[in-house]
Image (cartoon, rainbow, N blue to C red):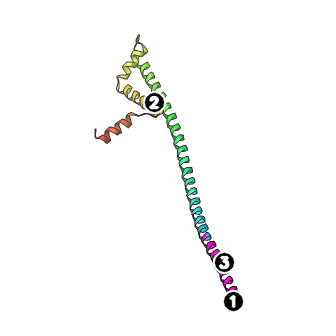
Amino acid sequence: MSQEGQRHAEELARLEARKKDLEDALMRLARDEAEAQEVAELAQEVEQLENQVETARAAANMEKTMTKDVRKAARLNREAAETQLDTLAKSMQQDGESFEKAYLRVLDTDMGKALMRTRNDAQELERGGITSMDVAEACKRLGG
């Protein structure tokens, strides 16, 4: 091969190597762009998840506050019902009759039964338990 041909062959080899380097760089760039896009999408998902967590945390705190408020109100209602039962028993207590016996008589009256149901429901709300209203609703749903 002539010296001129040799120089062209070397130039061709150099250009082909350069072409290969540029193609490789282009592939890396495309891969890097795809990764950058994926990172951006993941960052957006992370931000959405953080917002959801914050919303859930706020809801849980609100629920906790509401639960505390409900339990406090239930305790106050229970105490009020107990006081009313005691007051009613004292007002119905006959001469020589024990308070306990008058209290038992009060529990047999409609008012006593209503106060006792109120007291029991308040106590269940305080504990986070099942109230007579919950039972009535369940019966209604079951058709009973």
**Residue behind mark 1:** 2
Residue under the point 53% across and 40% down = 64
Reply yes or no: does residue 111 show up in magenta. Answer: no
Going by the numbered disc 1, the residue's amino acid type is: Ser
Residue 20 image position (x, y, % from top left): 63, 76
Q: Earlier in the sequence, mark 2 or mark 1?
A: 1
Q: Alpha-carbon distance for marks 2 and 1?
A: 107 Å
Q: Secondary structure at mark 3?
A: helix
Image quarter in which the N terminus is found: bottom right
Q: Are marks 1 and 3 in contact (CB under 8 Å)?
A: no
| Side of 83 relative to 41 (left or right) | left
Q: Alpha-carbon distance for marks 3 and 2?
A: 84 Å
**Residue behind mark 3:** 18
Q: Alpha-carbon distance for marks 1 and 3?
A: 24 Å
Residue under the point 38% across and 29% down = 114
**Residue behind mark 2:** 123
Q: How many marks?
A: 3
| Side of 136 relative to 12 (left or right) | left
Q: Are marks 3 and 2 in contact (CB under 8 Å)?
A: no
Magenta residues span 1-27
